[in-house]
């Protein structure tokens, strides 16, 4: 449903008016936000604060929970974790919408969220009534169930909906319809009638799909937030994740004394990621902590046969559909028509997500037409059994949540359709792989299979006996993707199997050529050269020019790893002669770029620079961005060696503007800019960039090529020796705050082509190290304010202001208040200059 139709995403982090306002958590009144920040207010008055305290106290008492208007809701016997942002969004939405439907996947936590929301509704709602529809199977009894929940009976002359209208009248009431999905049509009719005849009634509904009533606002309840990928053992960062907090809370309930610490944090985080933050699945997995080690739970989740056993054992007193994840999915599955059930289970072979074309290819057949599949896919998304992946990239991709997919795969096996579905998936992947044919240097070109890596791995694992030639080629394609994504261990395992098996011979020299490149990634130069020699030998015998060019390029890479620069140059000169005969400008330019890199290592900078001046325009115009980024980096490194610092800086900066900030591609130009900083005499900036890049490489588990790494480490050591101990510590401390886009912004913040003074450049650079509050405090110091005056201005304590100033000193390497004032003044002046 489009936003214009009333759809509101459950993750309210999107830029919207709602996400920029704050309301009182008790009465919903708008709050006045102080312009200088501070801790955000939660209540509009002391009365609301006291009312919230009384409610929290009451919620800790077992038994029925009265709402503000005196209605009774079922008690919560365990704690409510997270969802504060969703609660705030719901409070805002209910003020403008009379029908608010919470949708989401089975087990996502819709019922618990709506009940928690209802407990805190303001007193102006005289009554809140809950109607639990999960056990109601006969739609004809819906009106009677509503009447029973409202506590009214039939009267003479009034039956059915008239009784409900009479009971509700024009009182400000809230009616909660829980689990409407199996009665969606009668619920929609009843809701429309009641809202039309009861002007002050509001309805909250939970359903796997929207009711599609005019005026309905749909609020999609998403999965719990997951821990960041780089927060491996940072307990504080991991506890920001709602999924982790829920797991720890429920695990501690079953196993008193359980707590998150550095020794178990990575296991808990991975369990939550594996379960996609699905609330019911996280709770069920956590209940096993008392009986199983965390490593055993994670291993069980990785085994699709035992995962369903782990995700059982829910509450005996709750709804039957919450007794286990399989029961929850089965509840949704029974509501599908036969065609929807078929597509639902066939999609389970696509573990890495899919677009509409993939779904049509894999799911069509045996009674399901291709044109049907897209309609069914949209229906499954509407029923929350398929989720759309975030982002605006085309084509749109979907996926089944991991735990739901395991249940669907179990049904696919039981149906006897697994073999035929896998066969269709293999045909789809083979056609996709065929789009990359004709590439001379396929190992370094973007693989059309890259987006389908997980699907390819899963289908290959399930396809034993499906044509050896097809499997061999797809296995090579999967190894190529692993190599391109810097996962050499996975690539090498696949390639070793192919090299030992008879089917690998049909691949010619491209198999040992790729294996040679992978060995270089793993810093195994002897094996790399052996494989490179084998690739060249095979291709000379086959007399395949394209294959020979690729093999020569791979052997040259192995020789560069061994430090045999002259031999590498010789291989690449021959490669260039072969490729030039093809008449393909991009391949010629790519090979020229490799030759230029080898010449740089061999001391032939002038010839290398001439080659890059000819090949770089072609690559800029025709090549995909990873190839362009690599060539720009080579050109920058050559200009740096020639002492042309401004040109080198411009080229490195260009790479940063086209490479994703969180990828390893962005680290080479960051290191290049560190080298420029060393040669320019800015040692603190150089060391900060180097340390930030080194930290990012450790997080991504990636290493640069040997010659480049050696040069960067030498420059970093030179910077260390020329800095004082305090300046070194400040650079290292400042680097800790530089990650992803923030690192890119800092690296780009001081271009030598800028006409600012060096003082202005440093001030603008360093602003990326400080938080907004720290920058504000520094600016007030520059205005001449004392700590007490700053505290009064910002609504902080004097101690907090002093702490902020300590952090500013540490991050910037400054020693006194006067230096902070000078820095802030330079920063302000630099900002004015930049805006002119």
Image: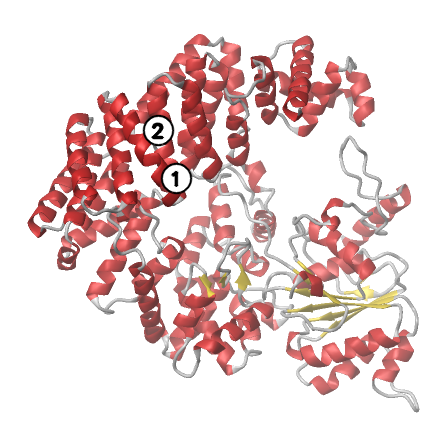
Residue 399's place in the image compared with 158, above or below, is above
Above or below: residue 133 compared with residue 90: below
Q: Is residue 240 left or right of residue 414?
A: right
On the image, numbered disc 2 is attached to which residue? 635
Q: Residue at x 62, y 10 (%)?
A: 815
The quarter in which the N terminus is drawn is bottom right
Viewer-proximal residue among 369 and 159? 369
**Which part of the image, by quadrant, shows the C terminus?**
top right
**x%, y% of residue 459?**
33, 63
For residue 136, side relative to residue 422 (left or right): right
- On screen, 150 above or below 604? below
Vertical arrangement, residue 453 with respect to residue 832, above or below: below
Q: Position of residue 787 (x, y in %)?
A: 77, 16
Residue extending farthest to the bottom is 157
Residue sitting nearer the eye, 765 or 347: 765
**How far across and down, in percent of the image, does residue 191 sit?**
78, 75
Q: Disc 2 vs disc 1: which is toward the camera?
A: 1
Tags 2 and 1 in contact by the CB under 8 Å rule?
no
Q: How busy is the neighbourhood of tag 1: few (under 14 within 10 Å), some, or many (20 plus)? A: some
Query: What percent of the width, then of the height, locates residue 735?
Result: 51, 25
Answer with the quarter of the image where residue 138 lies.
bottom right
Residue at image position (74%, 85%) is 141
Furthest residue in direction left, as rendered: 541
Residue at position x 74%, y 57% from top? 116
Residue 137 seen from this side: yes
Q: Which residue is mark 1?
A: 620
Q: Is residue 702 visible?
A: no
Residue 746: quarter of image:
top right
Count every numbered label the image shows and give the total.
Answer: 2
Element type at mark 2: helix
């Amino acid at each position: 449903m489009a936003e214009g139709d009333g759809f509101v995403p459950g993750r309210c982090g999107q830029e919207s008016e709602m996400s920029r306002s704050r309301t009182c958590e008790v009465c919903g009144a708008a709050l006045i936000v102080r312009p200088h920040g501070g801790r955000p207010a939660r209540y509009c008055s002391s009365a609301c604060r006291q009312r919230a305290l009384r409610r929290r106290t009451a919620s800790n008492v077992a038994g029925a929970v009265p709402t503000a208007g005196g209605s009774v809701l079922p008690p919560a016997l365990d704690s409510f974790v997270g969802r504060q942002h969703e609660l705030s969004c719901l409070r805002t939405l209910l003020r403008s919408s009379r029908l608010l439907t919470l949708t989401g996947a089975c087990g996502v936590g819709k019922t618990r969220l709506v009940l928690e929301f209802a407990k805190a509704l303001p007193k102006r709602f005289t009554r809140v009534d809950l109607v639990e529809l999960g056990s109601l199977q006969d739609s004809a009894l819906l009106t009677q169930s509503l009447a029973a929940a409202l506590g009214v009976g039939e009267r003479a002359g009034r039956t059915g909906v008239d009784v409900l209208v009479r009971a509700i009248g024009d009182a400000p009431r809230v009616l909660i319809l829980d689990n409407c999905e199996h009665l969606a049509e009668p619920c929609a009719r009843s809701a429309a009638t009641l809202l039309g005849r009861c002007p002050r009634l509001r309805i909250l509904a939970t359903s796997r799909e929207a009711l599609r009533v005019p005026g309905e606002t749909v609020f999609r309840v998403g999965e719990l937030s997951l821990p960041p990928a780089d927060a491996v053992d940072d307990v504080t960062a991991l506890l920001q994740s709602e999924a982790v907090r829920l797991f720890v809370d429920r695990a501690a309930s079953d196993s008193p004394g359980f707590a998150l610490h550095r020794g178990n944090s990575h296991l808990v985080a991975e369990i939550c990621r594996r379960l996609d933050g699905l609330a019911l699945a996280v709770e069920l997995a956590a209940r096993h902590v008392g009986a199983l080690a965390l490593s055993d739970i994670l291993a069980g989740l990785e085994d699709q046969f035992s995962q369903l056993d782990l995700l059982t054992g829910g509450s005996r007193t709750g709804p039957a559909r919450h007794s286990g994840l399989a029961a929850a999915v089965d509840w949704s599955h029974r509501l599908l028509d036969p065609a929807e059930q078929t597509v639902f289970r066939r999609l389970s072979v696509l573990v890495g997500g899919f677009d509409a074309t993939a779904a049509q290819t894999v799911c069509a057949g045996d009674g399901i037409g291709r044109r049907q599949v897209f309609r069914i896919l949209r229906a499954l998304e509407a029923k929350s059994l398929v989720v759309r992946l975030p982002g605006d990239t085309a084509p749109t991709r979907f996926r089944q949540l991991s735990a739901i997919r395991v249940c669907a795969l179990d049904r696919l096996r039981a149906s006897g359709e697994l073999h035929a579905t896998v066969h269709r998936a293999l045909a789809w992947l083979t056609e996709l792989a065929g789009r990359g044919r004709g590439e001379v240097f396929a190992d370094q070109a973007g693989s059309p299979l890259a987006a389908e890596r997980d699907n390819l791995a899963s289908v290959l694992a399930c396809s034993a006996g499906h044509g050896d030639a097809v499997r061999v080629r797809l296995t090579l394609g999967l190894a190529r993707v692993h190599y391109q994504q810097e996962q050499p261990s996975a690539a090498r395992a696949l390639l070793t199997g192919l090299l030992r098996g008879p089917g690998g011979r049909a691949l010619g020299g491209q198999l040992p050529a790729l294996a040679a490149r992978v060995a270089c990634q793993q810093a195994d130069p002897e094996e790399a050269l052996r494989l490179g020699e084998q690739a060249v030998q095979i291709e000379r015998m086959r007399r395949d020019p394209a294959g020979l060019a690729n093999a020569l390029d791979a052997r040259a890479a192995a020789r560069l790893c061994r430090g045999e620069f002259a031999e590498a140059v010789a291989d690449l000169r021959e490669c260039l002669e072969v490729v030039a005969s093809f008449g393909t400008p991009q391949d010629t330019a790519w090979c020229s770029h490799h030759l230029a890199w080898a010449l740089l290592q061999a001391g032939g900078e002038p010839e290398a620079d001439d080659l890059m001046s000819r090949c770089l325009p072609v690559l800029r115009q025709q090549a995909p961005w990873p190839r362009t980024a690599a060539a720009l980096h080579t050109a920058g490194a050559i200009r740096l060696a020639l002492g042309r610092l401004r040109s080198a800086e411009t080229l490195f900066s260009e790479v940063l503007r086209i490479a994703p900030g969180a990828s390893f591609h962005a680290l080479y130009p960051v290191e290049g800019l560190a080298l420029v900083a060393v040669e320019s005499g800015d040692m603190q900036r150089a060391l900060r960039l180097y340390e930030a890049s080194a930290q990012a490489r450790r997080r991504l588990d990636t290493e640069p090529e040997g010659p480049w790494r050696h040069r960067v480490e030498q420059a970093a050591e030179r910077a260390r020796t020329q800095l004082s101990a305090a300046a070194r510590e400040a650079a290292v401390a400042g680097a800790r705050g530089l990650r992803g886009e923030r690192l890119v912004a800092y690296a780009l913040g001081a271009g030598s082509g800028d006409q600012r003074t060096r003082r202005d450049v440093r001030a603008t650079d360093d602003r990326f190290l400080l938080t907004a509050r720290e920058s504000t405090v520094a600016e007030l110091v520059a205005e001449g304010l004392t700590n007490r005056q700053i505290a009064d201005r910002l609504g902080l304590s004097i101690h907090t202001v002093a702490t902020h100033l300590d952090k500013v000193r540490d991050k910037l390497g400054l020693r006194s208040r006067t230096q902070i004032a000078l820095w802030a003044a330079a920063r302000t002046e630099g900002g004015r200059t930049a805006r002119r």
